Amino acid sequence: MTVVITGASLLIGALLGLPLVAARRSAWSPLRALATGYIDIVRAIPPITWLFLIYFGLPQYALRLDSVSASIVGFSVIASAYMAETYRSGLLSIPRGQWEAATALGLKFLPKARYVITPQAFKVTLPAVAAYAISLLKDSALASTIGVHEITYQAGLASRATHQGLLAFSIAGLLYIAMSVPLAVAARRVDRVLRRKLEVA
Amino acid sequence: MELATERTVSPPTLGGVKVLGLHKSYGKHAVLHDVNLEMTEGEVVSIIGPSGAGKSTFLRCLNYLEVPTAGTITIGDSTVDAGARRPDRACLDRLRRVTGMVFQNFNLFPHLTVRENITLPQMKVLGRSRDEANAVADSLLNRVGLAAKSDQHPARLSGGQQQRIAIARALALSPKVMLFDEPTSALDPELGLEVLAVMRDLADEGMTMIVVTHEMHFARDVSDRVMVMADGRVLELGPSEQVMTAPTHERTKKFLRAVLDR
């Protein structure tokens, strides 16, 4: 469940982040304000409050989500805001001249974004995305509070059943380490390869 | 595309340039006042003048990297009327199709190899196949003397080499007019020479060129005419020899004294 929630939220958040960053950089100021407001508000509320809002708050007026869906929705919303900001910093790192050269060559928006900007922005954002994936993985433990059967929840059950709290939560900790550390190592390796390939000194 | 006969009112010579009453302002601050320029096909015009004169802005208006506030730009058979609030996309696309631009900072795409830098726009803008694009790239790289570097990434090359590749990249789309925005200003003098040599060849081959530059020798010896700008206006525009040796305007004399007698 930990993996499902983290993976799904990261994916949905990464996709939602795209229109969001586009809106954030839009020339039309109301849209820009809306996106900025969304990002600021989403990030201002702690993740656990978001989960409670969606799991306990929404059913009062609208739909009732099961705990897994509720946590995926919650973490996706949060991830979308963080990813949008990550993309934005990636875009800002690309010199104006790259856009100008592509424009002067007559490249339209899509090929420009796809072949010129994204490959360069990807390199810059990769470490930040990996760092966020790891923090999301850890945040997913919060889903235990609304009854999702992920690692921390299972550890809680086990500790109550066996009275071996130390053992149960140590195993939970090791499981998180077993996922986070390889992720971090892989991200660093890919980053290094990309850097070497681009020969940025 | 090649043959555009009998089109609209008073078109310039095929591949020529006609700029009428170009204005550009940021809010109340005007940076270009009523700039006019007519060129025939194959002509080379250098634009010189003190910094802040609006030379680069003028050049960048020609392919709409900057949006002029008023005026008309005709290049080849493409006309854009800047008075219209939002020129339609097709017009802008055509304007950018017929112009090629070379920047002060080269602006090569760092994540692509030299050859890919030249083939990408050909494939995405002109729809050429990879083979066709590669053939064009190789022949242009030969022409700028860098065939051996085609599989390198730009960061490995000197500034002069990068600029020659940027020129090849622009030429690959067979523009009618080449716009050079201080192409040697970011280079040390020796590397600048190799870029100037390529530009000189290009001029000899009959390319229409507009060159914003501080290279006074290039302005005098290679270009047909020199345009002097200061404070967003054209001070004078005339045959290179005459403008460079016997300028009429007092401001031009002062500028030339400053750059030549040092």
Image (cartoon, coloured by chain):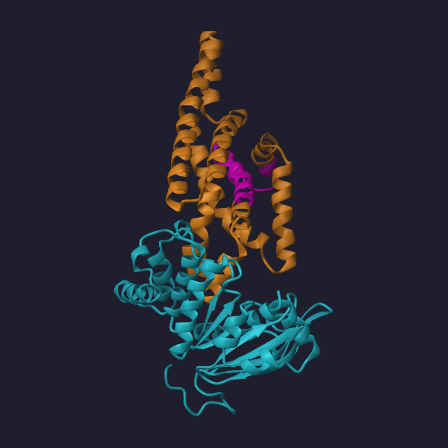
Q: Residue furthest front?
A: B261
- Which chain has been coloured orange in this picture? A
Position of B251 relative to B156 (above/below): below
Position of B150 relative to A16 (above/below): below
Secondary structure mostly seen in the magenta stretch: helix
Q: Quadrant of the N terminus of chain A?
A: top left
Q: Quadrant of the C terminus of chain A?
A: top left
- Residue drawn at the location 53% of the way across and 67% of the way down: B181
Q: Which residues are magenta?
A: A57-86
| Res B80 visible | no
Position of A121 relative to B147 (above/below): above
Residue B47 at what x, y percent from top left?
A: 57, 74
Foreground of the two, B92 or B172: B172
Residue B214 at what x, y percent from top left?
A: 56, 67
Foreground of the two, A21 or A113: A113
In reply to whether residue A189 is colored magenta, the answer given is no
Foreground of the two, B54 or B11: B54
- Which chain has been coloured cyan in this picture? B
